[in-house]
Image: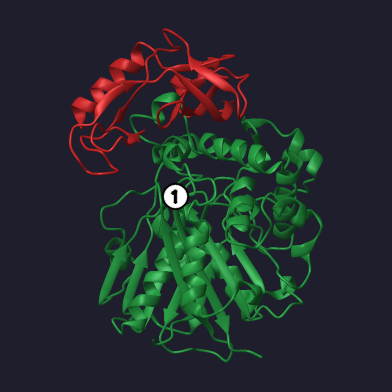
Chain colours: A green, B red
Amino acid sequence: MRPAYITGVGLTSFGRHEGRDSLDLMTHAAQLALADAELERGQIDGLLTGYSTAMPHLMMATLFSEHFGLRPHYANALQLGGATGAALVMLAKLLVQSQQCKRVLVVAGENRLSNTGGRDQAIQTLAQVGHAHQEIPFGAMIPGYYALLAGQYLAQTGSTEADLAEIAVYMRRQAQAMPGAHLTDPLTVEDVLASRTIASPLRIADCCPISDGAAALVISSAPGDDTPVRIAGAGQAHRHQHISSAIDWNNFGAADAADRAFAEAGIGRESVEILGIYDSFTVTLAMLLEETGFAPRGGSGRQIAQGFHDGPDQPLNTHGGLLSYGHPGVAGGMAHLVEVTRQMKRQAGDRQTAGRARIGYVHADGGVLSAHVGLVLATDRG
Amino acid sequence: MQEIFDRISQSYASGRLIYQTCPACGGSQTFARPFCVTCLRPDPVWQEASGGIVVACTTMRRAPTPGWKTRLPYAIALVDLTRGPRVMALADRVLRSGDLAVLRPGGMHDLPFFEPTETI
């Protein structure tokens, strides 16, 4: 199979971008990614976009294509909730490998926070991932669905709310070193446990913020600079949409997606030297880290508290994740990919991990641990 | 599907929670459809839930809509029915994972509502 490389990344700051709409933010990220890849717009022959809850549109890819002045041979907009960004990169890889395209721009962004209606409107829109007739009527919404997962997680594993709080504290510490992060105020376990409850057992500090922002990547058939990051493997799994249907506690699909990605890469989990794992809530990260095999069951909070991911061996979400860098929808999940790529290329500035970061694993989920995409990234650096 | 969802809404309004089982294969399903998702045969039959074991229960302190805001705090539970699938409904805030729960006659807020019980 022909290789596909990440040859450019772009990431705006996440937070409040007053007066800027989805197309403004996507344009900014796209320009950053093209500059990073040292490409002109005319060299892009494939365009993949996410969706924007702030600017719903039937044809987001061609809408952005016209706006940004592209003439792609292939365009598509994809919707898999939080897994969209990783799924777009998987599709870009397939387009490059099949020789349909040589250089694919992947871009998403929106003003989810400062949009008319703001946070309340976003919460109401996001609640729609629940079942229209048999879940939403009960006043359920995203934090409620994840709170029901958290309740199961704590009951099944014996893990504690303080263990989950450690995850929020770790992400905040990472974000404090990351330019452009949405949340950077100091945060302790005591602060997390004292923060107001949103949906028990989840408190506000267990939840990611709603942000404005955008991210972009360029996926190419040519390796680009002297530290190419190859998309070595990709896998998906989709076992349910709604939490009421997620009845197999041992298999939400995360492990299946990871297994498929590692099998394609021909690389084992033990080789992974940097992680970017979706963290919409503290419990999301805990469950994904454990099901994908990077922490023992019920042990992710303690593993993080013990400083395992602070060391050089397996840094995790060094940009602060959704929990603290922020979450503007599709771009939120793409930020993990941007950060892991930068670390692997040794372009992470002051945050550059001391470790080797030659093999990376990125995992994203959409819905309520519903749609899973895993990506194994590799550099051939020694 | 509209007929099916109307039937569910009507039962919800009286505090009753219904689900479907398949007379052919014995499968049961949470989400109503005109067919059995296990064997794809048409016309599953309706059953009425009574109680089961609480999988998880969350107390909501933030509401998705202005209507729900006036009812805060309220709790939502996932319950594995004794002879049926996993379902979602409103619940008493005291319920914890592993507890036994039954539907309260008449429900709450015109919706099915699980409350604690010693036996089912």
- Residue occupying the point 67% across, 64% down: A316
Q: Chain of mark 1?
A: A
Quarter where residue A358 is shown:
bottom right
Where is mark 1, residue-wise? A370
In this rendering, position of residue A25 left or right of residue A210: left
Residue ID at (37%, 29%): A134
Q: In the image, A346: left or right of B46?
A: right
Q: Nearer the viewer, residue A25 or A172?
A: A172
Q: Quadrant of residue A173?
A: bottom right
- Quadrant assignment for the N terminus of chain A: bottom left
Q: Is residue A199 left or right of residue B41?
A: right
**Is A248 located above or below residue A330 in the figure?**
above
Tag 1 secondary structure: loop
Is residue A24 visible in the rendered image? The answer is no
Residue placed farthest to the top in the image?
Answer: B106
Residue placed at 30% from the left, 29% from the top? B20
Q: Residue A187, relative to residue A307: is it above or below?
A: above
- Position in image of residue A167 (x %, y %): 71, 50
Q: Residue at x 73, y 44 (%)?
A: A165
Q: Is residue B102 left or right of residue A125?
A: right
Which amino acid, by three-letter code, is at mark 1?
Ser
Measured as percent of width and height from the top left, residue B80 is found at 48, 30
Picture coordinates of residue B106, whole percent (x, y): 41, 7
Where, by quadrant of the figure, is residue A320 drawn?
Answer: bottom right
* Foreground residue among B46 and A257: B46
Q: Quadrant of the C terminus of chain A?
A: bottom right
How many numbered markers are drawn? 1
Q: Residues within 10 Å of mark 1 (few under 14, many from 20)?
A: many
Q: Is residue A55 visible?
A: yes
Horizontal and vertical percent position of residue A273: 67, 74
